[in-house]
Amino acid sequence: MIFIATFYSHFGAMRCKKECDKAGISARLMPVPRMLSSSCGTCVRIESEDAERIPRTEESEQIAAEEAGGYRILWKAEES
Amino acid sequence: MKGSKEKLQIIIAGLLIGVVAAVLVLLGNPANMGFCIACFIRDTAGALGLHRAAAVQYLRPEIIGIILGSFLFALGKKEFSPRGGSSPMTRLLLGFFAMIGCLMFLGCPFRMILRMAGGDLNALLGLLGFAAGIGCGVIYLKRGYSLKRTYKLPASEGGTLPAVALFLLILLLALPSLLLFTEEGGGPGAKHAAIWISLLAGVIVGGLAQRTRLCMVGGIRDAILFKEFKLLFGFIAIFAAALVTNLVLTAATSGTYFNLGLEGQPVAHMDGLWNALGMLLAGFACVLLGGCPLRQLVLAGEGNTDSALTVVGLLLGAAFAHNFGLASSAQGPTDNGKIAVIFGIIVVIAIGEFNLASNRKKG
């Protein structure tokens, strides 16, 4: 499955990507898709069978699953 | 599929914005200045008496329109999201110095495109400096620069800047005697389209920029960071549409809207080094802010109070630039302005370094 993890900063996305690389999860940095947020910035596109494996940091904002025609929000940080 | 639709929307928005900007000049705005976020915030600072440069005083409805356009579109699409708390003072300072850079060049990144579309080759050196500044900012992003997260805030916080914009509009319409205006023939501040046309143009641009996240800095930043050119297409579309409109207007009217060359360009100077360094400072500061001055207005309209404070920083920078002789004129940059730009670049580097150091400490 494809997941998109968004962050409050580019730094957060870089850290997540590094964690994914360490864990052997396929991930790449890209701009946040417009359908997911009106904020521009960097997200991590992750290929994984399980959303729970996606590393979360204090800069994590949300995790969404890519679906036909859009995204389904799976998790959102508190107070976001 | 999703990506190509997004790209098409950005291109269409860019084309519309380019036409609107060029037509505003026909309707009264200064040449090659259908839109200039830096100049228009500077004019607004003048109208409010924050500086006394008599040539640049007018409460520009375009700025009000962009904030309100973004606010209304965000409300309509349920994207109005009051938030803040992401290093507000750092953002204010970066906004301040972004304005110092813009007023050295005599235009924000948006006007830089419009100047190129009007044939002003001085703006090419600005573009070179702008891209270099974005490159500097990207180095900091890659090294781990972060202004930290935002937090959800009450609607009253996020709605403050749109409310201020509405108040300024009422002031302009109902109590203009409280404001300062450049006298007829007294400078760029005296040149403007009718209030309602400027306001409508601002609402259109603000709305389109909200829907597409159009950003002059984001285009080059994403191209460097991800080899992703979507936002850059918006940048190119604005240029192409404004260029074609300028050529058509030159052919169809008695006015000159396109004049290729370095000399005699409107509201511009020919000092290439300082055109480039001014835009380097603007590009560098804007990457660390996360967006160009237009984007800051749009985000502020969406309820982002950090961007609202950045707009305050831009306003303060404009006032300082004219109170202390930092802004360039058609005669060229001032010595004070050169010192301020160098100082600004040092401050932005220091912000980047302190930020990295504090992130490293946190681990």
Image (spheres, rainbow, N blue to C red):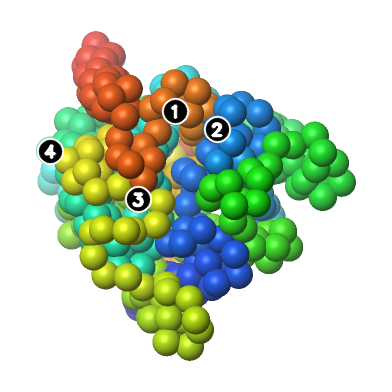
Labels 1 & 2 near each other (Cβ < 8 A): no
Tag in front: 4 or 2: 2
The answer to whether marks 3 and 2 mark residues whose Cβ atoms lie closer than 8 Å is no
- Labels 3 and 2: the sequence-earlier one: 2
- The amino acid pointed to by label 3 is Ala
Which of B292 and B282 lies nearest the eye of the viewer? B282
Most foreground residue, B191 or B115? B191
Amino acid type, residue under disc 1 in the picture: Ala
Q: CA distance from mark 4 to mark 3?
A: 52 Å
Quadrant location, the C terminus of chain B: top left
Q: Secondary structure at mark 1?
A: helix
Residue A64's x, y, as percent?
42, 54
Q: Which residue is mark 1?
A: B321
> How far is the residue under mark 3 from the one under mark 2?
17 Å
Q: Are marks 3 and 2 on the same chain?
A: yes
**Pointers 4 and 2 in contact (C-beta within 8 Å):** no
Q: Are marks 4 and 3 in contact (CB under 8 Å)?
A: no
Compared with residue B341, is residue B188 higher up or lower down, i.e. above or below? below
- In this view, the mark in front (3 or 1): 3
Numbered circle sitting on residue A22? 4
Residue at image x 30%, y 35%? B333
Q: Earlier in the sequence, mark 3 or mark 1?
A: 3
Three-letter amino acid code at the position of disc 4: Lys
To the question of a shared chain for discs 1 and 4, the answer is no
Which residue position is annotated with label 3?
B268
Query: Relative to residue B253, is residue B63 drawn left or right?
Result: right
Mark 3 surroundings within 10 Å by alpha-carbon count, few (fewer than 14), some (14 through 19), many (20 or more): many
Q: Nearer the viewer, mark 1 or mark 4?
A: 1
In the rendered image, the vertical position of residue B47 relative to residue B302, given as above or below: above
Is there any visible trace of residue B242 in the rendered image?
Answer: yes
Cα separation, mark 4 vs mark 2, equals 58 Å
